[in-house]
Amino acid sequence: MPQTSSKASKPSGMRRNLANYGDAEFSVFLRKAFIKAMGYSDDALDRVIVGIVDTGSGYNACHRNVPDLIEAASRGVMLAGGIPVPFPVISIQESFSNPTSMYLRNLMAMDAEEMIRAQPMDAAILLGGCDKTVPALLMGAASANVPAIMLVTGPMLAGSWRGEKLGACTDCRRFWARYRAGEVSEQEINEVNSELAPTIGTCGVMGTASTMALAVEALGMMLPGGAAVPAVHAERRRLAEQTGARAVAMAAEGLTPDRIMTPAAFRNALRVLLAIGGSTNALVHLTAMAGRCGIGVDLDGFDAMGRETPVLVDLKPTGQHYMEDLYKAGGLMPILRELAPMLEQDCLTVAGRTLGEIIAAAPPSWPQTVIRPLKQPVYKNGAMAVLRGNLAPDGAIIKQAAATQSLLQHEGRAVVFDGLADLAARLDAPDLDVTPDDILVLRNAGPKGAPGMPEAGYIPIPKKLAQQGVKDMVRISDARMSGTAYGTIVLHIAPESAAGGPLALVKTGDRIRLDTAGRRIDLLVEEAELEKRRAALPPLPSGEGRRGYERLYFDTVTQAERGCDFDFAIPEITKKVP
């Protein structure tokens, strides 16, 4: 007979999530008839079913090893007595997603949630990697609340160009900036292009993919050691096998995401985000993931946490190393050891053990130079700072650890771009009125304005300044920035200009003051003048005339401080972190 859970009201295996024909036994009969067409026996169909989310795609080199990982995870499921059933969902690769990968994240989360709900599975293995896929899968899994475990594809290895070690994608931006400045020839930039991503896997620096992998391991939704193993290593496949076996055990234990993704676990994840000098994108993603659990992220509390959490990881773009170096240094475990006094170690993890038990059971650390001790950090003042002020009443973020320190306190003249098209048309114009002391302002690039809040916050240095040797300027926007990027850049300004935020009121020539120490970003214009400008603004863009997913996205997406999730997907927020 088909297996059932200890609670008779919760069927398992092939009896889960039956199609509705008004006759449950006929539903099982019909389901078995069709799946037997694929060669399954009755014995196989009476076992625990583990769904494996397949995010492989010909457009996604970060996920090129997904077929191998599905094979290895399936082996682990079968060795543990279960039956693996891979199934497809949307795959998102950052550079192949128009208008942005963030625009599609919520669609992928909906896809994952509904497929987990609709199909018979006692547990799910969430197989992701490139940037938005990891939060999307965890958002969907949190809402479906079926036992689930994360498995990432892993980072790529670094390449080499003329003796210089490099890799995607901090070096993509560094060399492109040199090319724009005339320091690198067209032949040289083409040579570099072939070495930036020499293997499959996610970006080999502390970009969003690496950041999310480490944060999710700290959250407890991934097996210990699962974040940093390179995509091409045999250990990555062994981890997949272990993940498959553990998924079967989680199904038997009824270990659902709500028991793991707790406020305390999110505090640990946010702490690790700060200590690794992680991507600013991760704050938006963790906020969205927490929101699905009824947990709100308090930006001021996050800023306070940052003031006491130094950056410990010497990895690009904040440092010099790559993810393969972090793996050789021990991955997340040495970081957790350094942070142990600040962590909530009684949090349960998918391993069935608490975070503290995992730290205690791990092999001892060994000498290495990638992870610093607390008393000798890479950056002591916190990786990120939360800014407020009359330009960002609901908050903005600056990754101060990756900024030019002399620009963190700065006042300058605004040079305003009204959107991505305006930026593309005018940024490199020889007659652009701009100096190194000015502040570049990009608006209409937020969740609704772009749409999809693109990674356009890393506004290139105007070509004529770049050719003069200018490497950094203060740049502010309602957009995002890649975790691989660097510079003195204020992001996620909320509310965005397309939602009526004050950024819409800025004019070229206005003075703006960035006061990172005081946690403020202010437009130095009299309030009476701002009121006149506000009254003259055109009507805000609406969902009228849009259709399909675009209409749904535009009408329901929240602002950055709430995770850019759909408002209807977020349950009542009953708890706050940190």
Image (cartoon, grey):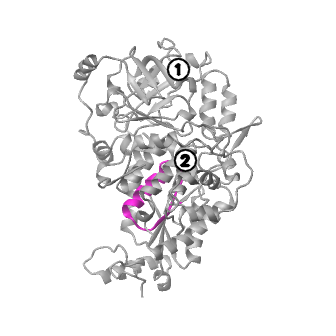
Q: How far, Cα to Cα, is label 2 from label 1?
A: 29 Å
Which quarter of the figure has residue 404?
Answer: top right
Q: Indicate the amino acid at tag 2.
A: Thr
Q: Residue at x 66, y 33 (%)?
A: 190
Q: Position of residue 158 (x, y in %)?
A: 69, 44
The N terminus, quarter of image: bottom left
Badge 2 marks a residue whose secondary structure is: helix
Q: Residue at x 27, y 16 (%)?
A: 529
For label 2, the residue is 211
Q: Position of residue 504 (x, y in %)?
A: 33, 25
On screen, 166 above or below 246?
above
Q: Position of residue 413 (x, y in %)?
A: 44, 15
On screen, 213 above or below 499?
below
- In the rendered structure, the answer to whether residue 389 lies left or right of residue 371 reads left
On screen, 562 above or below 186?
below
Q: Earlier in the sequence, mark 2 or mark 1?
A: 2
In the image, the segment drawn in magenta is: 126-150
For label 1, the residue is 462
Please tell me which residue lies in front, 265 or 87.
265
- In the rendered structure, the answer to whether residue 261 lies left or right of residue 402 reads left
Q: Residue furthest right?
A: 163
